[in-house]
Image: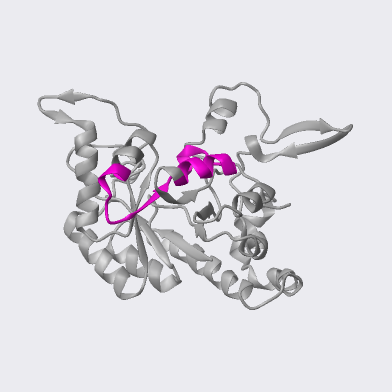
Amino acid sequence: MRINAPINNYESCKAQINAGADEIYVGLMTSLFSRLHFSARSQINGTGQQIMPSKEELKRIVMYAHAHNVHVNFTANIAYISDYSFDGLNLENEYIHYVLEGIDCGVDSVIVSDFGLMHTLNEMKLPVEIHSSTIFDTNSTAQLKFLKSVGVSRAVLSYQISIEDIKKMSLLPGMELEIFGYGGCSFSTYCNLGHGLSMGFPCKNYYYINNLEVSTNCLDSTQGCCLCSLWKLNSIGVNVIKIVGRELPYNQVSPITKLFKDVIKVVNNTNEQEFNLKMDSIIPAWWKRGVCKQNQCKYQS
């Protein structure tokens, strides 16, 4: 099980790799947009800081990462592209140019979240892996089979998914599974429906089987944390744990990367019972105060 950590510049790359990241994900600055762009993020965060590297900086990032055997994922996960053209500019052509710029820098994979763009990139037979973004809300084996048929080698699963569903999906050969280690609800279709439109849906959807009330994660908008579930997630075949925070300063995110990496090391050297006994002493007080006290544990069976 590997850690995929966010970066936004060369210094954050070094910090995240030093913290234990096995992979990093990053976009690329472009002059085409002033705000939200092909990376599904603004190029400037709320404090006015640039959170996308230039092409020259991205090349340095890739060289440093590869020198440390770290995989570089390129964020090209805008959720839609129209046929809009103006004064010789076509958005789809600009998107393809953006992806090719990333490939020219040496990235290893491209994260995509639009079916049309995924089809186009697959037809181009690019020398990189194609990963499907969480924006697809992938939460079933049927979806995985379709994604595999269009050239996807890794699916970043929906924020709203149970460990039982992940276990079933992990049985599909030839497809890596990536899930969020903590946090995440920003572009979820289900949450936008249930909460954004104020339709009154709860965060967990309750239903009845044989007069017993059970719940599903389909509408679960919890931020959550999966530290205590890492042993189970590893045992059922989850390949990658994603850390959120592209828009944050790296000194806020790299300690989280290190914490998850430390716990994964314990996962690799214990059985489930030993892991559960050790968790209370492994998790630091600052994480317990800020996360554990909310009692929002991800991927609990």
What residue sits 21% from the left and 59% below the top?
A: 105
Residue at the extreme left of the image, as rendered:
87
Quadrant of the image containing the N terminus: bottom right
For the record, the magenta segment spans: 121-148
Residue 135: in magenta span: yes
The answer to whether residue 282 is left or right of residue 92 is right
Q: Is residue 18 magenta?
A: no
Residue 76 coordinates in the image, percent (x, y)? 32, 45
Relative to 147, does residue 290 appear above or below in the rendering?
below
Percent x, y for residue 212? Answer: 87, 35
Q: Looking at the image, can residue 209 be seen?
A: yes
Relative to 125, is 271 above or below? below
Q: Which residue occupies 37% across, 69% down? A: 70
Please say whether residue 139 is visible from this viewpoint: no
**Which residue is pictured at 78% across the width and 31% down the height?**
207
Q: 96 or 151: nearer the eye? A: 151
Q: Determine which quarter of the picture holds residue 202.
A: top right
Q: Nearer the viewer, residue 97 or 256?
A: 97
Q: How is the image coloured?
A: one colour
| Direction right: furthest residue | 211
Asked if residue 187 lies left or right of residue 246, the reply is: right
Q: How many marks?
A: 0
Image coordinates for residue 18, horizontal then vertical, percent: 40, 73
Q: Position of residue 228 (x, y in %)?
A: 67, 62
Q: Which residue is at the front of the view, 35 or 220? A: 220
- The one nearer the camera, 203 or 148, is 148
Q: Is residue 98 above or below residue 266?
A: above
